Image (tube, grey):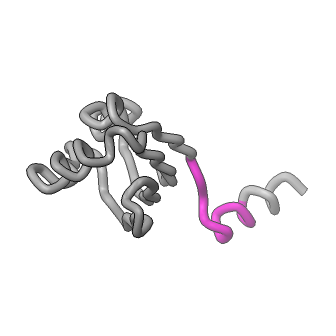
């Protein structure tokens, strides 16, 4: 399943966020395929697009960061897939 995640880093934890990112990067557990990731120039917001096989893999992906940032994870689908679903409901 495809997901978009908006990340908001607590300004008081920005330096810790940068330290962890330098040391370990984004550790992707099995079942996660990162499609893209972008950060603002202030390094306090980010967006990720990824595929995940299971809810457990999503939990494992974000758990190391939940003490220093908020994550809004939303399942999404591309417009081609959406059109197929909408067309079957007509």
Which quadrant of the view contains residue 48? bottom left
Camera-side residue of 66 and 48? 66
Q: Position of residue 15 (x, y in %)?
A: 25, 47
The image quadrant where one finds the C terminus is bottom right
User: Who's the residue at 32% across and 39% down the image?
Assistant: 13
Camera-side residue of 19 and 47? 19
Is 23 left or right of 75, judged from the image as shown? left
Q: Position of residue 60 (x, y in %)?
A: 27, 33
| Residue furthest out toward the right | 90
Main secondary structure type of the part rendered in magenta? helix
Q: Is residue 21 above or below residue 57?
A: below
User: Who's the residue at 51% across and 42% down the image?
Assistant: 73
Q: Position of residue 40 (x, y in %)?
A: 44, 66
Q: Position of residue 5 (x, y in %)?
A: 48, 50
Which quadrant of the view contains residue 31? top left
Report the span colored magenta.
75-84
User: Who's the residue at 21% across and 43% down the image?
Assistant: 29
User: Who's the residue at 80% across and 58% down the image?
Assistant: 86
Q: Is residue 41 above or below residue 57?
A: below
Magenta-colored stretch includes residue 89:
no
Magenta-colored stretch includes residue 80:
yes
């Amino acid at each position: 399943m495809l997901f978009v995640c908006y990340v908001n880093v607590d300004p008081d934890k920005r330096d810790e966020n940068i330290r962890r990112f330098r040391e370990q990067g984004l550790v992707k557990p099995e079942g996660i395929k990162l499609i893209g990731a972008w950060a603002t120039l202030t390094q306090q917001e980010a967006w990720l697009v990824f595929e995940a096989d299971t809810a457990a893999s999503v939990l494992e992906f974000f758990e190391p960061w939940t003490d220093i940032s908020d994550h809004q994870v939303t399942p999404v689908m591309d417009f081609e897939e959406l059109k197929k679903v909408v067309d079957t409901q007509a």
